[in-house]
Amino acid sequence: MKSMQSDPRSAKSEVANEPQLNLRLEYDSRFAIHGIQGELLMTRSDGAQYQALWPRSPRQAKVKSLAKRLDTLEGKTIGWLWDYVFRGDEVFAQLEESLKARYPGVKFVDWGEFGNTHGSDEREVVAALPQKLKAKGVDAVVSGMGC
């Protein structure tokens, strides 16, 4: 175990005449807590020991690398994905107008083709995306909005 001495000033009591505790943190590499190697143990000078655990749950999804960025949007098909939050319908319409003016031949697949990416059937909608995107010939996706 590696030991890290904490700053004793951080353990001072605010109550007069209360004994001051010397805290020591120890790292035990035998344990892995939700993706973090090791476990922190806090030991008080009176011998009491406490575990400090990672407060988050394990990752629910694996991290994947991003797709290669397109060189241009000219002649490409863009799919709009929306979580039905905020004003995606309005924002996407404005973006579509601007992108059509800037990139000749760009096409769009409306968000309604894919479903609500944040609704009660989110898992099913997201699971179906790869097949739907391929079937629609989508080259790139703009996903939004959140709030």
Image (cartoon, grey):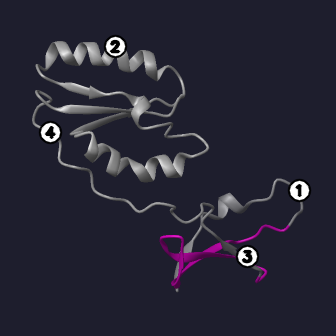
Residue on which the image places disc 2: 94
- Does the stretch in magenta take in 26? yes
Q: What amino acid type is highlighted by mark number 1?
A: Ala
Give the residue displayed 15% in from the left and 39% down from the top. Answer: 70
Residue on which the image places disc 3: 44
**Where 92 falls versus 113 (above or below)?**
above
Residue on which the image places disc 1: 16
Instruction: Determine which quarter of the picture holds residue 64.
Output: bottom left
Q: Are marks 4 and 2 in contact (CB under 8 Å)?
A: no
Query: Which label belongs to residue 118?
Result: none
Give the residue displayed 43% in from the left and 15% down from the top. Answer: 90
Residue on which the image places disc 4: 70
Q: What amino acid type is highlighted by mark number 3?
A: Arg
Q: Which residues are magenta?
A: 19-47
Q: Nearer the viewer, mark 4 or mark 3?
A: 4
Instruction: Determine which quarter of the picture holds residue 24.
Output: bottom right
Which numbered disc flags the more N-terminal residue, 2 or 1? 1
Question: Circle 2 — which element?
Answer: helix
Which numbered disc flags the more N-terminal residue, 2 or 3? 3
Q: Position of residue 34 (x, y in %)?
A: 53, 70
Q: Nearer the viewer, mark 1 or mark 3?
A: 3
Q: Is residue 137 left or right of residue 91?
A: left
**Where 138 falls versus 54 (above or below)?**
above
- Does the stretch in magenta take in 139? no
Question: Circle 4 — which element?
Answer: loop
Q: Nearer the viewer, residue 144 or 49?
A: 144
